[in-house]
Image (tube, helix red, strand yellow):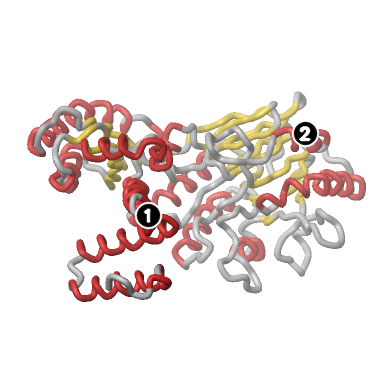
Amino acid sequence: MSSKQNTTFAHVSDAHIGHRQYNVKKRLDDMQLSFLSAASEAADQGVDFAVFSGDLFHNKDVDALTLSDAEKCLDRFQEEDIPVAAIQGNHDDNLYKEDLNWLEYLHQRGKLILLEANFDDGETFEPHEPDSTERGTSAGFVDFGGIRVFGVQYIGRGLENRLGDVVEGIRAANERYGEPEHTVLLGHFGIEGQVPKMSGLEYSKLEPLRDVVDYFGVGHLHKQYSIADWVYSPGSLEVHNIREDSNDLGYYTVEVNDDGLDPEHHLAKRRPFFTVEFSVDGYEDPESLEGGLEDRVEELVPKLREKQDREIYRGGGDRRQPVVYLRLTGLLEFSRSRLDVDTLQSIVEEAMDPVHIQVRDTTETKDAISILEEIGEGRAEVIGEHGQIDRDKLEVKVFEQLAESHPEYGEESSEVAGLLRSVKSDILSEEPVDAVADVIQGERRELFADAGGEGE
């Protein structure tokens, strides 16, 4: 620990080491590099300790390379004698519970101090005892000078029912082991209203904690936010979903002085994501559409280069290849079967040199629009989350209405629709006609046993 008067700590979260996004090796490397960069920056700023609020790993079945990558990041703190306290996130637990999970292993190795609450019998929060010959697999809290850090592992929706236990546990620990100058609590959960359409704990439920906690460091939502100057989420260190690209992802450094706690957010170094949105409206054939995309991409290249040149997106001073999202919108003037997505990807690849291209086709065809108008009130059931037609649901709806139009199929319309979809799939995959006929006969016998085989 530093001998300076003020204490400073780093708050990091959601590294998700081991996430091989899009099955691209460079994205696997990015997860470690972003955490290693944050650890190096925090160490260079002279932090006294660091806290990590969950999801060190991405997968529950951690392999040797992922474990090694995580240890290298934690070693960067150890090189500067910076201890790290961490909690378990929803991605961190073992796929199969054995004697130790990987965070417990790292705790025993002295790479980090794993904090978790005991909601069974005994003390809710037991102190970390670094000099004990029995290291244990976790602790309830750890003191760094006058700052006491408590941790609550991810317990999903069960947290809401345990908040009272957390408050009483903190009070009991402070009464038994002495009052700290400041209290930090780590948790891994979402707070309602921070991310659209994502549920979470109501902020009002956290209010009792405010009496015993000065800094509540949370993770899980991958979004940077703060509430009421005491709840802080730094965001993830890398983008794990295109919706996160607009977020200020990074980490906090928190200076503790006579006036209290003063958090400062820092942007993480990460790979640039870039969206190419292209409307197919007005193009009468694939050739003209491809030419239109070439023009659109050429128009956007300067904006991409401007983004790549920002300091947080550069790697070793060099531009990093982007991840590009190609989002197709609008109304196709020709058959979807003539839309050559591979050619469209090649156009983007040649101009933008991405590490990966992710295509999202939200286009519609005139036939689909006509069918949507015909199904009337049922159209709401086939509209997707982002306002586009869900073609699978549209197909089901069409087959259901087709079945319902025949009185003898009315009560079994859903099952008949499923059979029609199956038959269509078999035909398109060139299954033998006799095999398809056998499927139809078998299903008809099962659905209409009372018909006595009529019409076979």
Which quadrant is home to the C terminus?
A: bottom left
Which quadrant is home to the N terminus?
A: top right
Residue shown at 71% from the left, 35% from the top: 215
Count of numbered badges drawn on the protein: 2
Q: Position of residue 397 (x, y in %)?
A: 36, 48
Which residue is label 1 attached to? 407
Q: Nearer the viewer, residue 176 or 288?
A: 288
Residue shown at 20% from the left, 32% from the top: 280
Which residue is label 2 attached to? 207
Callout in the foreground (1, 2): 1
Q: Count neighbours of disc 1 (C-alpha within 10 A) and say few if under 14, some if 14 to 19, many if 20 or more.
A: few
Residue shown at 40% from the left, 61% from the top: 415
200 is higher (above) or lower (below) than 284? below
Q: Count neighbours of disc 2 (C-alpha within 10 A) and say few if under 14, some if 14 to 19, many if 20 or more.
A: few
The answer to whether residue 392 shows anywhere in this view is no
Disc 1 from disc 2: Cα separation:
59 Å
- Mark 1 or 2 closer to N-term? 2
- Work out which residue is located at the far right of the displayed protein and give it: 175
Q: Along the horizontal axis of the image, is 153 left or right of 391?
A: right
